[in-house]
């Protein structure tokens, strides 16, 4: 297992917590823009809140046109889409649906549990194995 790190500012985590609580009882989602260094060091620079096109507590869906728009914007800002965030009104582990989408979107998946009140992050590798990502909370 390779060690993978996600550095994210405390303020960004607070923002994601707030988005998650606002969306209850449904799931919320956001895109994480930033940089990847040495393949395993991911740093979040910007968060873009997304509207889920479904309102349910089981899964979320991002409209592909909106996602494409984020990709274009990230290019303008010289940043990459390094992660996808969403909240769970249950434990912060990927669901079966999440695992399918993790294969299509092989970026870090950051999940916040509104019941456990914690973040966990995961990345699927080429062999479809789930790697746990270490979250580095950056204080300013
Ligand atoms: Zn999920």
Image: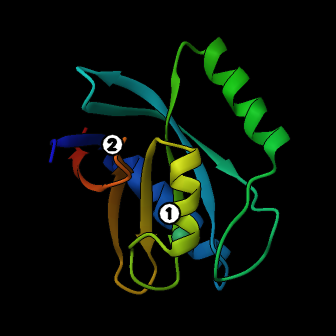
Q: CA distance from mark 2 to mark 1?
A: 23 Å
Residue 68 point in image, percent of width and height:
76, 32
Instruction: Depth check: give the residue in front, 126 or 56.
Output: 126
Position of 136 compared to 18: left or right? left
SS category of the residue bearing label 1: helix
Task: Check disc 1 and report the residue beneath it.
Answer: 99
Which of the 4 quarters of the picture holds residue 38? Answer: top left
Residue 7 point in image, percent of width and height:
28, 39
- Mark 2, Cα crowd under 10 Å, few <14 / some 14-19 / many 20+, is many
Q: Earlier in the sequence, mark 2 or mark 1?
A: 2
Q: 54 above or below 127?
A: below
Which of the 4 quarters of the picture holds residue 113? Answer: bottom left
Residue beneath the point at 80% across and 44% down: 64
Position of 29 compared to 129: left or right? right
Q: 80 above or below 93?
A: above
Residue beneath the point at 34% across and 32% down: 43
Does the numbered disc 1 mark a residue whose Cβ is under 8 Å from ligand 1?
A: no
- Mark 1, Cα crowd under 10 Å, few <14 / some 14-19 / many 20+, is some
Position of 59 compared to 127: left or right? right
Q: 132 above or below 82?
A: below
SS category of the residue bearing label 2: strand
Task: Check disc 2 and report the residue beneath it.
Answer: 8
Contact between marks 2 and 1 (CB within 8 A): the answer is: no
Q: Quadrant of ligand 1?
A: bottom right
Does the numbered disc 2 mark a residue whose Cβ is under 8 Å from ligand 1?
A: no
Residue beneath the point at 46% across and 80% down: 114
């Amino acid at each position: 297992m390779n060690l993978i790190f996600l550095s994210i500012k405390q303020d960004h985590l607070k923002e994601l917590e707030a988005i998650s609580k606002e969306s209850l009882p449904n799931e919320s989602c956001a895109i994480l823009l930033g940089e990847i260094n040495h393949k395993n060091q991911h740093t979040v620079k910007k968060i873009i809140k997304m509207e889920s096109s479904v309102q349910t507590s089981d899964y979320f869906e991002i409209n592909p046109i909106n996602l494409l728009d984020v990709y274009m914007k990230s290019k303008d800002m010289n940043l990459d889409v390094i992660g996808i965030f969403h909240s769970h009104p249950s434990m912060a582990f990927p669901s079966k649906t999440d695992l399918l989408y993790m294969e299509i979107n092989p970026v870090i998946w950051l999940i916040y549990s509104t019941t456990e009140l914690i973040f966990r992050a995961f990345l699927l590798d080429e062999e479809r194995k789930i790697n746990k990502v270490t979250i580095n909370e950056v204080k300013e």
